[in-house]
Amino acid sequence: MLVGIISDTHDHLKMVEKAFNLFIEKNVKYIIHLGDIISPFVVKKMKATIGDKNIKVIATKGNNDGDVYLLKKLFDEAGWTFYSTPAMINIDDLKIFIMHGYDGVEFTEKMAESIARSIGADIVLFGHTHRTVLKNINNTILFNPGEACGYLTGKSTIGILDTKTRKVELITLN
């Protein structure tokens, strides 16, 4: 099964639409958003782009997400899941830990690596830093897809996880 992974969209509707269309084209069954969606209108764009496709979206709150109440409400209305804290989820018998990030880049990356070493997850996903990371730590995949918005790095990047092979593909959208 394929899982789309995206983070740090920061209201960039064009890149949200481009990423979600690519996820649809690749036939993903889930999309995991690792935070900093920002505004509720982005969730409306996500829903409109997915349309009647049977794709579940799971998200965790980012440090810049504004109206968390409405974000959660829109996710609930779509039949999706929005976590206000980091969470351990299960997809295709894989334990996947999802979080946004905290404080600066180095702290977030060290925390994510520490979690990968200690929590018993198959995969640890995080965002926040706007930098791509793909490592294997003690047979745990550690992945940050970077920023979908492309504001800081000039690159809009996302990922696709194959749950059967446990391989992650990093994709540049621009």
Image (cartoon, rainbow, N blue to C red):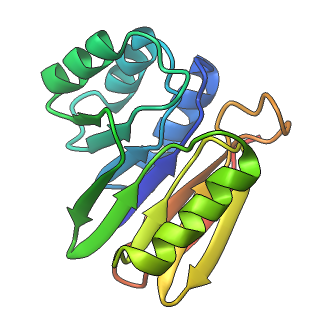
Give me the residue at 34% from left, 65% from top. Answer: 96
Please provide percent x and percent y for residue 170: 64, 62
Q: Which quadrant of the figure contains the N terminus? A: bottom left
Please provide percent x and percent y for residue 94: 27, 74
Side of 173 where 6 appears, left or right? left
Residue at far bottom of view: 138
Please provide percent x and percent y for residue 37: 49, 25
Relative to residue 63, is residue 83 depicted above or below? below
Does residue 143 appear in this view?
Answer: no
Relative to residue 18, is residue 78 depicted above or below? above
Does residue 66 appear in this view?
Answer: yes
Q: Which quadrant of the figure contains the C terminus? A: top right
Side of 56 where 167 appears, left or right? right
- Give the tally of numbered discs: 0
Give me the residue at 68% from left, 30% from top. Answer: 149
Relative to residue 161, is residue 69 depicted above or below? above
Give me the residue at 47% from left, 68% from top. Answer: 115
Relative to residue 116, is residue 155 depicted above or below? above
Give me the residue at 42% from left, 18% from top. Answer: 45
Please provide percent x and percent y for residue 100: 50, 43
